[in-house]
Every structure is written in C-alpha cells, then in structure tokens.
Image: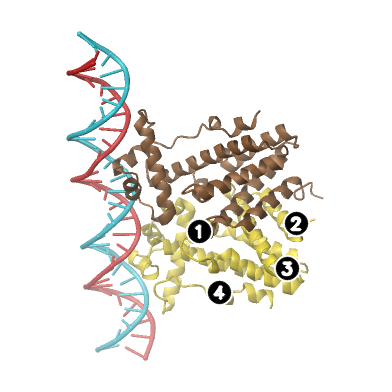
Chain colours: A brown, B yellow, C red, D cyan
Amino acid sequence: MALIDLFGEDSLAQGRQVRTEPIQQRSAARLSALLDAAAEVVDEVGFDRITTAMVAERAGASIGTVYRYYPDRVAVLEGLRERAVLRFRQRVADNLKAAKPESWWEAVDCGITAFVELYRAEPGFRILHFADRERAQTSTPGEQDSGFFANQIAAVLSEEFGLSGGDDLIFRLEVAVEMADSLLSRAFTWNSQGDERFIAECRRIMHDYLTGFYGPDAG
Amino acid sequence: MALIDLFGEDSLAQGRQVRTEPIQQRSAARLSALLDAAAEVVDEVGFDRITTAMVAERAGASIGTVYRYYPDRVAVLEGLRERAVLRFRQRVADNLKAAKPESWWEAVDCGITAFVELYRAEPGFRILHFADRERAQTSTPGEQDSGFFANQIAAVLSEEFGLSGGDDLIFRLEVAVEMADSLLSRAFTWNSQGDERFIAECRRIMHDYLTGFYGPDAG
DNA sequence: CAGCCATGATCGAGTTCCATTCCGTGAGCA
DNA sequence: TGCTCACGGAATGGAACTCGATCATGGCTG
C-alpha cells in the first residue's frame, strides 16, 4: 500500500454532517465560503463567542443558508474540523511525496511538518485540538480519530519501513499522536508562528518514543 | 520549601471570577452547590449545551442567584475549572503527605495518581483539559497554568530531590505536564474508570522522559 | 437556440429559546 | 426595628433556528 493512498483524499469517506448534499456547483463554493468564514471568526472571537450570524455575514450569505448546510451552530464547527483533518491528510501526502522518506522517522517528521505548516497558514486550524474531546461525548470509540489515524500510520510504517506491527505498534502510535497533538498545539498557544522549542522537542520525543526508549520493551 | 506548602490551598491566591464575595455563610454553600450542579450538567450534556437555567435548577436556585455569583455563563465554567485545579493541588498534597516519596519520580507518581483519582470521582473534572486552550485566547502567558505549575513542580523537585534545576528543567516539566494531561485525559475519554493502558504508559513516559532519555541531553 | 419548467438554492422576517438584568421580597444581623 | 445581604423570577435583548416566498440553474422540448 502506497503512502499516498493512505493519506490522500480518497481514503476519506467521512460521516456527513451537512444537511443536504449540494448538487449544483455554486453550492460547493458556498459551503466552502461558509467554512472559510467560520475559520476566520473562530480565530478572531474564539469558539465560545462565534455566532451563526457572524459566519453568515462574513461569508456573504444569509442565516438561512448556514442552516441549509448545517443543522446547528456546533455542526458548523464540526464541519470546519473535518475539513481541517482532510487538509492535514492531504498535506501529509504532499510532504511524503516531496520528501520521499527513506526511514520511518523521516515519514513521521513529514507529519509533524504538515501539522506545523497548517497551523501557521490555515485560519481556524486550532479547531483540531479543540473539538477532539468535545466530540468524544457523542461519538463512539471505533470512529475515533487518533485511533483511526494510528491504524493508518501503523499500516504505513510497518509495510513501508518494516516496523514490527501489531496491536502494540498501534497503541504506541495512538499515544504518540496524542502527545504530538498536545505538544504542537501548545507550541501555538502563545505564539502564532509556533514556539520552536516545543516543535523541536516534539520531533525529538516522537523519534525517541517510537524508537523504543519507552514502552513495554524499553531498555 | 516543603511539598505541602507548594500544593496546599494557601498557595492559591487565584484571580477572583466571582462577582461578589459572599459575606454570609449560607452563600458559600450556595456557591458550592452551583459549582456542583455545573459539574453534573457538564458531564451530562457537555460544555456546549450547558445553560445557566440548567445549573440553577439543578442547584435548587434561581437564575438570579447564578448571576449574583458569576458575571456570565463562561465564568461559571471557569469557576468550576478553578475549583478543580484547587482540588487537584490539595489531592496532590494529601498524596505526598501519605506516600512520603523518597525519590523524585515517586513524587511525580503522586501527581499522576491524584489526577486519576479525581478524574474517577469528581464530576466535571474533565473541564480541566477542556478549558485550557479556550482560556489561552484571552489570558496572558505569564499566568498560564501548565507553566506556573511547572515552576512549582520544578522548585519541589530541585529542592527536595536535587534534580538539576534551571530553565531546562522548567521547560521539560512544562512539556511533561502537557503530555501527561493529554494522555490521562485520553485514558478517560472512552472509559469512565480510565484506560489502564494509557495510565500505565503515562507513568512510564513521565519517568523516562524526566529521567533524561529525552531532550537536549538525551543519550 | 429560445423558451419553459422542475428542482435546487437563497433569503430574511418571524419564532423560540437562552443569557442576562433588575427590582421587589425575604432572611440574617445589630 | 431598621439595615444590609441574599434570593427570586418576571422582563429584556439578543442569538439560534424555522419556514414559506423568491430567485437561479440546467436540462428538456419544440
């Protein structure tokens, strides 16, 4: 299985949160504009203060249009989150294609780099870290992102670079994803460009943890 | 400086978010009841869906009473969060007193244990992980919790157990706090008793990371 | 190719719900 | 008894959300 296959957009048959699938083309643009607007508003006023009216106005649409695509305010944020996940995966795929990693940790670094790049460039990208725990209350473990994601990465690392696979690898990757998300988000909490100390430490920790300094087999 | 001093309630001159300091005693009970109610509601309906009316009703109070103590809905959540932090510190202090750790990592374990115990027993404790990032948008780095907390822990570890202090230790502790919070919260995301795998892995990672397998001086 | 029409898309006034205010009433305290 | 603190809950304002009217679009038809 090629790296691109795992992280490309094809692999995303995401659960639809939109009310009505857009048929005409202009709708796609509308939907996209709504999310763009939501992203900007999130960065400006925060998650709590965002209002559907703000999103509509910013997108040059009416309130009704917002509710045509999303059942409620929270769903808009979830839509934004899904798009962010999608873009992250695409960026990872791009970086993998460009870097042609020869070791597993170079591949991991591509993932970290993708995250950092998007955090810097993409408005509202912080939604990723935010929405995780809130969603947890309503969805089920099977469809959890970090777990699902860990599975994908496990497949890549074991098939492409010969890391010993199995449940242990998946678990370790889940732990790694959790830590990386947390550290990188922390890097951007007080610094819009990302605190390099945290980013560098994150890379080092990922490398060492996955190398095996840690965990059941650590020695 | 004794461990208890650092983690006892005295050390908490927290920023008041309440509108009016209660004068009479019954008020203290009211305030506490409000937070208890908020904690339950948070666990039941989530952060997004909580309403001031729910909190008031659950606490057997009127809407007006909620607003007597808190300026707005968000402030209630912040109040809940501050109380959770306070209780966490007290629990750490208790555990330290009971365990009388002889090594720095036993002390660290007390912190992890305290977190797990409270997550299991305290309604709404997940507010801790949640509120962090949201606050970030409005408050300033200086008063950040993980940083402030890291400072306190650094003082304890270096003074009591002779860990080499300095900025490096503080930074490493900040990273550790971030990772531990993330892993422990993850442990409780799908399992109300806490997934033991994540808890155990968290303990191991904290031990190894702080021992120095990681970081600038890792070898 | 012009016109027609079924259907998707949009709008925004209207409705409902919720956050927040405010003043009248009741409870502690001297 | 009077004074201040605390409480209640109707009233206000604003934001979430609905819904029927209206406007595009793109295919079909002659």
Q: Is residue B10 left or right of residue A168?
A: left
Seen at 62% across and 46% down, the residue is A112
Asked if the residue at tag 3 contacts the one at tag 1, i.e. Cβ–Cβ closer than 8 Å, the answer is: no
How far apart in space, not on screen, are marks 2 and 1 (Cα)?
Answer: 28 Å
The subunit carrying tag 1 is B
Foreground mark, 4 or 2, reads 2
How far apart in space, not on screen, are marks 1 and 4 (Cα)?
Answer: 19 Å
Q: Is residue B86 left or right of residue B68?
A: right
The residue identified by callout 1 is B131
Callout 1: SS: helix
Percent coordinates x, y for residue B111 in the rendering: 66, 63
Residue type beneath disc 1? Ala
How far apart in space, not on screen, are marks 3 and 4 (Cα)?
Answer: 23 Å
Callouts 1 and 3 in the same chain: yes
Residue type beneath disc 2? Asp
Q: In the drawing, what numbered circle is on residue B12?
A: 4
Q: Rate crowding at label 3 as few (under 14), some (14 to 19) or many (20 or more) other CA atoms within 10 Å.
A: few
Q: In the drawing, what numbered circle is on residue B99?
A: 3
Foreground mark, 3 or 2, reads 2
Relative to the observer, which residue lies in front, B146 or C19?
A: B146
Residue type beneath disc 3? Ala
How far apart in space, not on screen, are marks 3 and 2 (Cα)?
Answer: 21 Å
Q: Rate crowding at label 1 as few (under 14), some (14 to 19) or many (20 or more) other CA atoms within 10 Å.
A: some
The residue identified by callout 2 is B208
Foreground mark, 1 or 3, reads 1
Callout 2: SS: helix
Q: Earlier in the sequence, mark 4 or mark 2?
A: 4
Q: Earlier in the sequence, mark 3 or mark 2?
A: 3
Q: Rate crowding at label 4 as few (under 14), some (14 to 19) or many (20 or more) other CA atoms within 10 Å.
A: few
Asked if the residue at tag 2 contacts the one at tag 3, i.e. Cβ–Cβ closer than 8 Å, the answer is: no
